[in-house]
Image (cartoon, grey):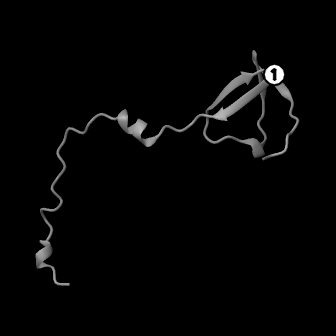
Amino acid sequence: MHPERHIRLFRNGRNQALRIPREFQLPGNEAIIRKEGDRLIIEPVPRPALLALLATWEPVAEEFPNIDEALIPIDDIDL
């Protein structure tokens, strides 16, 4: 666990902002922020699971070629 660090808050337009020090950087370019009492909790957005991603894809309409067609039969191979 990283030690705590004091930082300065600043204004960015109408928003209050802070710079996250390198040792506290989060992966990706999005985060989730929530408030619990006086604490702000900032967490990286979880990456979607592979099955969730695949569920969003449309089915493939084209037929796949028979790749076994051009192979030598296994019985004809000398070992």
Rendered view: 11 above or below 31 = above
* Mark 1 closeness class: few <14, some 14–19, many ≥20 residues within 10 Å: few
Q: Nearer the viewer, residue 35 or 13?
A: 35
Could you tell me which residue is drawn at 84 percent across and 44 percent down? 3
Helix, strand or loop for disc 1 = loop
Q: Nearer the viewer, residue 15 or 1?
A: 1
Q: Is residue 70 left or right of residue 4?
A: left
Image spot of residue 52 (x, y percent): 42, 36
In the image, farthest residue toward the top: 14
Q: Is residue 57 left or right of residue 77?
A: right
Type of amino acid at the residue the image marks with label 1:
Asp
Quadrant of residue 69 in the image?
bottom left
Image spot of residue 28 (x, y percent): 60, 40
Quadrant of residue 67 in the image?
bottom left
Rendered view: 49 above or below 41 = below
Could you tell me which residue is drawn at 66 percent across and 34 percent down? 43
Q: Is residue 36 left or right of residue 47?
A: right
Quadrant of residue 38 in the image?
top right
Q: Which residue is mark 1?
A: 38
The number of callouts visible is 1
Could you tell me which residue is drawn at 12 percent across and 71 percent down? 73
Image spot of residue 5 (x, y percent): 86, 39
- Quarter holding the C terminus? bottom left
In the image, farthest residue toward the bottom: 79
